[in-house]
Amino acid sequence: MKLSDQVVLITGGSRGLGAAIAKAFGREGAKVVVNYYQNEAKAQEVVDEIGKENAIAIQGDVRELLDVEVVFQRAKEHFNQPITTVVNNALVQFSFDAANRKTVDSINWDDYQVQFEGSVKASLNTVKVSKNDMVDQKFGRIINIGTNLVQNPVVAYHEYNTSKAALLGFTRNMAKDLGPNGITVNMVSGGLLEKTDASAATPDDVFALIRQSTPLQKVTTPEDVADAVLFFASPWARGVTGQNLVVDGGLVMD
């Protein structure tokens, strides 16, 4: 299915990487569902930039199955066709702040639970709700957002890194389970992004160090990652599933 024929849900689509992904799909003519949890104004800005004829902002906490069901139903009614493509991007209560991160002495299981629910549980909810329509269409694209910190935890963000490692396992198992129905499940893992709300607490000297250490001599941008997400949704990736594409300028070579 061409990108311009797809209806794409981006969870956490109101800011940062999510907004960049939403705009990238909008640029290619897809119909875009900008999911947000709290910031309606930011979500509406993304919709306005894409164009209201091809985008809608819908509130919902993706950790709650009932909320996800409402998001999918509203999108289906608005565009008069079901969602074909899901980008699980939402990030819950986390900042990339190495100086104030939780260490082994201060972290507890509740901290892990918050991130597991925001990544794995939320992705499970969107897969469950999208599956039947994708099976009916014999087409579905699910793209999960990971991190290169799984391969190389240069900063031990324990709860975040571990939740994304679990999301990679989720990605591969879902790829195996859903593949016979024409549904692909892949992951795109960016490096530290310059600069989003989540990375705002990261000092400039850290970005400088990444730039010096990276083969492309640049820090990854949200737009870099967004275009890789487009690849997995496009016809060019029709034979690819269960894969993790690291987009960080070559900092991690997996």
Image (cartoon, helix red, strand yellow):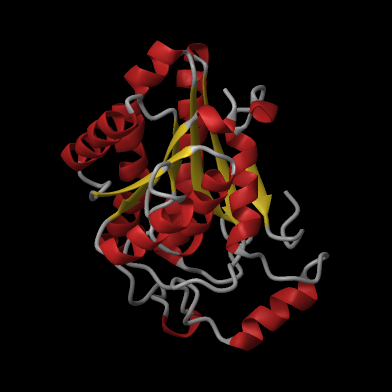
Q: In this view of the protein, can residue 17 be seen by the observer?
A: yes
Question: Residue 199, how many percent across, how many down?
Answer: 50, 74
Kindly indicate the quadrant of the structure image that contains residue 115.
bottom left
Up/down of 243 relative to 109, above or below: above
Position of residue 28 in the picture relative to residue 196 (left or right): right
- The answer to which of 64 and 222 lies nearer the viewer is 222
Q: Residue furthest right?
A: 215
- The answer to which of 72 and 160 lies nearer the viewer is 72
Query: What residue is shown at x 44% (from left), y 28% (from top)?
Result: 84
Position of residue 199 in the picture relative to residue 240 (left or right): left
Kindly indicate the quadrant of the structure image that contains residue 9.
top left
Q: How many marks?
A: 0
Q: In this view of the protein, can residue 243 be seen by the observer?
A: no
Query: What residue is shown at x 45% (from left), y 19% (from top)?
Result: 177
Question: Residue 226, how many percent across, how many down?
Answer: 59, 51
Which quadrant holds the N terminus?
top right
Position of residue 116 in the picture relative to residue 232 (left or right): left
Question: Residue 106, how many percent across, how many down?
Answer: 33, 76
Query: What residue is shown at x 65% (from left), y 26% (from top)?
Result: 235
Up/down of 129 relative to 96, above or below: above
